[in-house]
Image (spheres, helix red, strand yellow):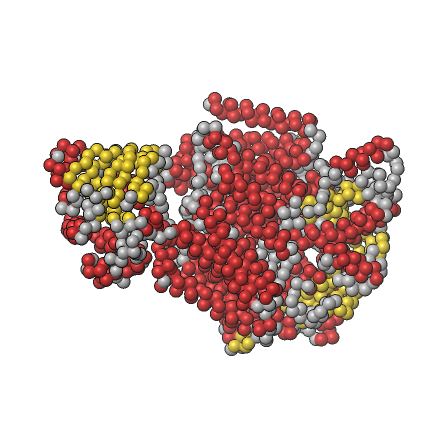
């Protein structure tokens, strides 16, 4: 078994005085696509933010590529190869699509340059005709594509996707799903936070379920699908 | 009020040319100071109440460099460079500690710096007022254009200020770093998540803002009196410009600065006793009807 | 800052001396504390500092000669930061807490009126050495029995300036006039009075344009171009200090000073003259302080002594405070005492020898307790030292005559 | 109700102590200090009704302090009315002005509110400077305040003015304390913490904001009246921007989260001013360094700092 790319060990995270995460831990190995499932407010986004360096854990550790990166700033995490796609996409609305991509361009931690603009447009053919349009004027699905493309511009080792399907029409969700399968096909390491388990079915191999700030279940995605009790208790489906 | 005089002026080419250039020169120097102010606010959400002090220190440094080297150009560059460095130190040592804090805390820190710098200037340069004096190259009689009087020095100032303003907008509009700065103004966390060191970026923005104010102080030094506390009136006017133009909008600052310059140059003919009042009333009206200024984005 | 507090030792020895031999005069006698408040900080710090410089010179001289009726002077300096409410507080504190028996008030305009009210409430002896606002002493409404003035007055300047300008205007046929003065009470009042007396002496004057820049305005360009547009033959300005130098520097590049004859009431002060790099020749200016007005040995000696000690020339403020201290000195001599009540009595109508008097003396006029007979005149600028030449001293006979008329007209007498 | 009686008892005690102090220490500087303190503390506490309790950062509150000095001094000089009548008329003038100014300003938020209030103050400052016939322009209102008599007591006498100032301060603070402890005060804090939610819960936000704006203007003008009596006149410096700055510094240094924070801040500021200006002419340098030490060292006002250290939680915060 390969050593994990990311390992989150027993972290506690607070917002002000209120504790959000209680000893959360999970691991993602190279080439693995992991789903972090849970209901609204279960602690998914906070976990993602703690990994991405936007919310420092008060206890516990985050290891990335074998280094302890607990409490590092977001830009440091990004430079070490972690790309974060936030839940509300957060494209730069006044910038054009291409400028959004250019801003994010950088080499990978080992100097990789696998994602030149040309390849991005190949993988995201939808974006090329829109490249001169202000990102704020794109549809939700287009913005999600752009956000993922923007993350790839940084030649990351691993992708963090926070609720990529949220608020999108089913047909668009399907298209994003196809894209993510494509990424999985080329061996990307991905952690997806989702409420929608079905979205993750064809994409992720493994799943952890979070509820009230604690990890309550770990299994393969197929195992989770089979476990009705866990699904109805923690995922309301 | 003297509307006849105003009418007489706008119908005479000599008066039009003279007053327009005089409005432009006041406006362009104001723009350089206000551009830095609005840039810093736009990206860092910091209201830099010490910006007038940057202008003052820039003028004093330029004065000393001019006295030392005898070169006006070197003097101005020294003023700009000095304030770029000062801006970084100011941001790193003080302002970085109050990001996201209440505006009153920012006001407090900036005001402390204003107080300290005014006294430091008094200690280093003395309480007397100084004048740099016109560099020899510009000790020439004014030009007459369409009957209007236009001094070559002011043509140079307008051109230089326009060039700096143009360079700034090209930098922000076309270069990658400029795009990053504008993106950071909108969403600094996301910019950081893309691997960009925002700490460095903030320092850079303060350096640029400080440099602009320092350059303006240096450029103006031959014609304005240098005295401790000289930064205050320019600060107030820059605030009016930034607020009218929309805080965070460089283009808005340019337009508002020129408009303010023209209000003053033609206002002094039409409303000689009420130009100051006009500025405050303009500011109040614009804030009431368009709270974010002419070109500002609605803040959430 | 210079030490302002008496050391414990001087206080103690002073007290001991009083206990042991209360009537022995000389160095051992109890010091007379004089409180002096002025602006020592901010853009106008220069005023307080040059006031104080002159006072230090006088105190050293007076103390070396035996002090005020045998008691040495001890100054207590306080900064009022140009704020009238601070001036009032500081004045009260000087009297109430610091044991000052009299004040030398070096506040300008608003501050001096605030101090005047404190003087009224406390009944303390005070000489104003900075305010030039005529009404402070001329208007009986504001007058206080124990308050005097050793500084020049706006009305005197206006009369003298008007008379001088009328002569020049007559000779050079200057009938179209413009003015450019700071937009506040001092600027407006002196400009109106100046024009009034200019018209008094030369009725065919026409004022075609008036500009009112703000105090401390960084840029005067629009004002300058407005004046040029109006094409006057002559212009009067009451700008002073940093505003005046900025105005002249900015006017220079528009060749303003060759386009019209400029009369600047406040230019002939070294602080302005030395700051301007390219001083245009031929500007008519009233004297603030120059060593050549009055052109006497005493004045030159005093100016040189000041320059030697402080490495710069004195200012208008300097001579006014110096005169204030000389009045205290003269009054003590006349009264044979340093008691404030006796000093006040002695001050009324007192004539003293003074380097700044037009005939070597100045008088504290009894009726309104203000200084008269000081040297006042107009000359024209040179590009190099001594900067001002051809100073025509004013005739105090004319001043008195027109001043009395002015007072009558305003209901002051 | 118990709280009110306790506060009143503390107030009476404070006045009694203050009345006795001058009989124990002879110098008059203490009296001057208390008079100025009364003026500035009322002003600063009134500003804190906006800043600390409602979350409205005004940069132009000095408008009402200055207007208080001018309207009171002018009423005393130009009309024959008695001091108490002039006092009440001044409050009315300020209330009316505050309704007009507030109606325009409270629509704006955050930094824009701050700037428009500052612009209002500067506009009033320019009007006062240019209306020379009425206000004396930059020279200030000259000639002193006549008839400084209340109920047969001459406030021209320093001790009397001192007692008057102390009584006005205590009463003013008691009323403001009562205001913030009522349900109206609760509405203020709800608006500060979450305006949308306050509105959702049925609070008419604009009405509450306008009311507190007018109330704070009225208390600021009381501070102005005390200052006007102290300097026996009115001066444009009392309505210029730095006077607003002084109040802001007082509340930030004393603490916005404690009711007495602004009063403590005022005392710190006045003491600094009085002590530092005696020692050096580099007042700005000294004050600047001290402010930085406060802002970066404590990161909050002194009283808030102490309350937090003692384990309590202050009523509000600004950082």
- Let me know if residue D94 appears in the view: no
Above/below status of D292 relative to C244: above
Q: Answer left or right for D233 relative to A112.
A: right
Q: Quadrant of residue A145?
A: bottom left
Q: Nearer the viewer, residue C203 or C281?
A: C281
From the viewer's side, name the closer residue of A89 and B104.
Answer: A89
On the rendered structure, is D244 left or right of B199?
right
Q: Quadrant of residue C67?
A: top right
* Residue C172 occupies quadrant: bottom right
Q: Position of residue D145 (x, y in %)?
A: 66, 41
Can residue C318 be spotted in the picture? Answer: yes
C172 sits left or right of C225 in the view: right
Name the residue located 88 percent from the left edge and 43 percent from the top edge. Answer: C336
> x and y percent of residue D86 in the render?
60, 39
Q: Position of residue B15 (x, y in %)?
A: 53, 72
Q: Which quarter of the figure is the C terminus of chain D placed in?
A: top left
Note whether A62 is above or below A96 in the view shown: above
Residue at the location (83% across, 63% down)?
A: C296
């Amino acid at each position: 078994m390969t050593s994990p790319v990311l390992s989150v060990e027993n972290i506690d995270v607070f917002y002000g005085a209120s504790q959000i995460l209680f000893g959360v831990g999970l691991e993602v190995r190279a080439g693995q696509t992991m789903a972090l499932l849970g209901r609204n407010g279960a602690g998914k986004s906070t976990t993602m933010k703690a990994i991405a360096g936007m919310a420092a854990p008060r206890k516990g550790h985050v290891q990335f590529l074998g280094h302890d990166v607990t409490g590092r700033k977001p830009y440091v995490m990004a430079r070490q190869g972690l790309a974060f796609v936030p839940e509300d996409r957060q494209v730069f609305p006044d910038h054009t699509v291409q400028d959004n991509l250019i801003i994010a361009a950088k080499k990978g931690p080992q100097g990789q340059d696998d994602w030149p603009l040309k390849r991005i447009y190949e993988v995201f053919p939808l974006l090329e005709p829109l490249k001169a349009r202000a990102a704020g004027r794109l549809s939700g699905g287009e913005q999600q594509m752009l956000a993922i493309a923007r993350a790839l511009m940084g030649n990351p080792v691993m992708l963090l996707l926070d609720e990529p399907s949220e608020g999108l029409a089913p047909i668009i969700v399907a298209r994003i799903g196809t894209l993510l399968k494509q990424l999985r096909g080329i061996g990307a390491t991905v952690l997806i936070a989702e409420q929608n388990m079905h979205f993750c079915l064809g994409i992720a191999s493994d799943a952890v379920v979070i509820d009230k700030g604690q990890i309550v279940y770990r299994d393969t995605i197929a195992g989770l699908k089979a476990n009705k009790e866990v699904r109805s208790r923690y995922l309301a489906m | 009020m003297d509307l006849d005089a105003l009418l007489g002026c706008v119908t005479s080419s000599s008066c039009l040319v003279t007053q327009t250039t005089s409005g432009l020169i006041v406006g362009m120097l104001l723009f350089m100071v206000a551009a830095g102010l609005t840039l810093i606010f736009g990206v860092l959400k910091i209201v830099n109440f010490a910006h007038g002090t940057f202008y003052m220190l820039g003028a004093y440094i330029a004065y000393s460099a001019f006295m030392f080297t005898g070169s006006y150009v070197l003097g101005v560059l020294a003023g700009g460079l000095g304030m770029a460095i000062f801006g970084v130190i100011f941001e790193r040592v003080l302002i970085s500690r109050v990001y996201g804090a209440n505006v009153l805390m920012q006001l407090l820190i900036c005001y402390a710096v204003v107080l300290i710098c005014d006294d430091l200037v008094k200690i280093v340069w003395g309480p007397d007022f100084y004048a740099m004096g016109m560099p020899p190259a510009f000790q020439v009689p004014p030009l007459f254009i369409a009957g209007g009087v236009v001094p070559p020095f002011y043509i140079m100032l307008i051109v230089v200020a326009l060039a700096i303003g143009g360079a700034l907008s090209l930098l922000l509009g076309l270069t990658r770093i400029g795009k990053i700065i504008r993106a950071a103004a909108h969403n600094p966390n996301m910019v950081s998540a893309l691997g960009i060191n925002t700490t460095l970026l903030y320092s850079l923005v303060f350096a640029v803002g400080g440099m602009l104010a320092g350059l303006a102080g240096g450029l103006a030094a031959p014609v304005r009196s240098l005295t401790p506390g000289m930064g205050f009136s320019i600060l107030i006017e820059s605030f009016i410009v930034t607020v009218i133009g929309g805080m965070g909008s460089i283009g808005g600052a340019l337009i508002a600065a020129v408009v303010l310059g023209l209000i003053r140059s033609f206002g002094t003919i039409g409303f000689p006793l009420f130009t100051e009042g006009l500025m405050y009333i303009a500011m109040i009206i614009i804030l009431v009807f368009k709270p974010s200024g002419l070109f500002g984005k609605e803040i959430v | 800052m210079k030490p302002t507090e008496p050391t414990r030792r001087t206080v103690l020895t002073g007290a001991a001396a009083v206990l042991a031999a209360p009537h022995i005069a000389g160095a051992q006698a109890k010091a007379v504390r004089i409180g002096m408040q002025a602006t020592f900080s901010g853009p106008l710090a220069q005023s307080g500092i040059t006031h104080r410089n002159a006072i230090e010179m006088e105190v050293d001289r007076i103390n070396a000669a035996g002090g005020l009726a045998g008691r040495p002077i001890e100054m207590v300096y306080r900064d009022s930061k140009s704020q009238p409410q601070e001036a009032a507080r500081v004045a009260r504190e000087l009297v109430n807490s610091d044991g000052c028996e009299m004040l030398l008030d070096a506040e300008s305009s608003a501050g001096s009126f605030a101090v005047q009210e404190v003087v009224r409430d406390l009944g303390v002896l005070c000489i104003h050495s900075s305010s030039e606002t005529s009404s402070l002493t001329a208007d009986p409404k504001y007058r206080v029995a124990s308050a005097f003035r050793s500084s020049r007055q706006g009305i005197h300047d206006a009369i003298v300036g008007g008379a001088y300008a009328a002569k020049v205007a007559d000779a050079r046929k200057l009938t179209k006039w413009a003015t450019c003065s700071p937009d506040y009470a001092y600027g407006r009042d002196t400009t109106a009075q100046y024009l009034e007396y200019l018209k008094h002496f030369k009725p065919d004057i026409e004022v075609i344009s008036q500009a009112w820049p703000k105090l401390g305005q960084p840029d005067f360009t629009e004002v300058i171009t407005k004046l040029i547009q109006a094409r006057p033959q002559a212009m009067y300005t009451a700008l002073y200090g940093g505003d005046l130098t900025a105005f002249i520097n900015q006017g220079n590049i528009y060749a303003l000073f060759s386009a019209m004859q400029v009369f600047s009431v406040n230019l002939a002060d070294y602080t302005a003259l030395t700051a301007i790099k390219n001083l245009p020749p031929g500007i008519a200016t009233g004297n603030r302080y120059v060593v050549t007005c009055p052109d006497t040995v005493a004045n030159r000696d005093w100016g040189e002594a000041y320059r030697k000690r402080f490495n710069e020339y004195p200012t208008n403020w300097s001579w006014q405070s110096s005169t204030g201290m000389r009045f205290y000195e003269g009054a003590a001599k006349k009264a044979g005492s340093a008691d404030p009540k006796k000093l006040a009595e002695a001050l009324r109508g007192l004539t003293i020898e003074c380097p700044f008097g037009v005939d070597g003396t100045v008088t504290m006029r009894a009726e309104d307790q203000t200084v008269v007979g000081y040297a006042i005149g107009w000359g024209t600028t040179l590009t190099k030292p001594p900067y001002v030449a051809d100073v025509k001293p004013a005739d105090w006979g004319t001043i008195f005559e027109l001043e009395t008329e002015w007072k009558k007209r305003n209901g002051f007498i | 109700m118990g709280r009110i009686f306790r506060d009143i008892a503390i107030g009476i005690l404070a006045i009694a102590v203050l009345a006795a102090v001058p009989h124990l220490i002879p110098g008059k500087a203490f009296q001057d200090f208390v008079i100025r303190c009364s003026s500035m503390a009322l002003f600063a506490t009134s500003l804190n009704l906006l800043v600390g309790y409602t979350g409205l950062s005004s940069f132009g509150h000095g408008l009402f302090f200055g207007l208080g000095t001018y309207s009171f001094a002018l009423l005393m000089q130009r009309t024959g009315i008695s001091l108490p009548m002039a006092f009440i008329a001044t409050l009315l003038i300020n209330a009316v002005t505050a309704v007009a100014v507030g109606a325009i300003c409270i629509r704006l938020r955050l930094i824009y509110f701050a700037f428009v209030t500052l612009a209002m103050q500067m506009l009033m400052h320019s009007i006062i400077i240019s209306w020379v016939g009425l206000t004396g322009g930059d020279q200030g209102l000259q000639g002193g305040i006549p008839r400084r008599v209340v109920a047969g007591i001459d406030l021209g006498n320093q001790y009397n003015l001192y007692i008057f100032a102390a009584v006005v301060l205590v009463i003013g603070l008691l009323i403001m304390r009562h205001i913030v402890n009522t349900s109206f005060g609760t509405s203020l804090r709800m608006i500060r913490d979450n305006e949308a939610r306050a509105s959702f819960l049925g609070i008419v936000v604009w009405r509450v904001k306008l009311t507190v704006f007018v109330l704070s203007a009225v208390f600021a003008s009381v501070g102005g009246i005390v200052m006007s009596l102290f300097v026996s006149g009115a001066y444009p410096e009392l309505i210029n921007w730095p006077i607003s700055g002084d109040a802001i510094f007082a509340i930030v240094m004393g603490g916005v989260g404690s009711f007495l924070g602004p009063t403590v801040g005022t005392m710190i500021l006045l003491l600094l001013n009085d002590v530092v200006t005696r020692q050096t002419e580099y007042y700005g340098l000294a004050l600047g360094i001290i402010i930085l030490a406060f802002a970066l060292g404590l990161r909050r006002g002194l009283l808030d700092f102490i309350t937090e250290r003692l384990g309590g939680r202050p009523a509000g915060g600004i950082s």
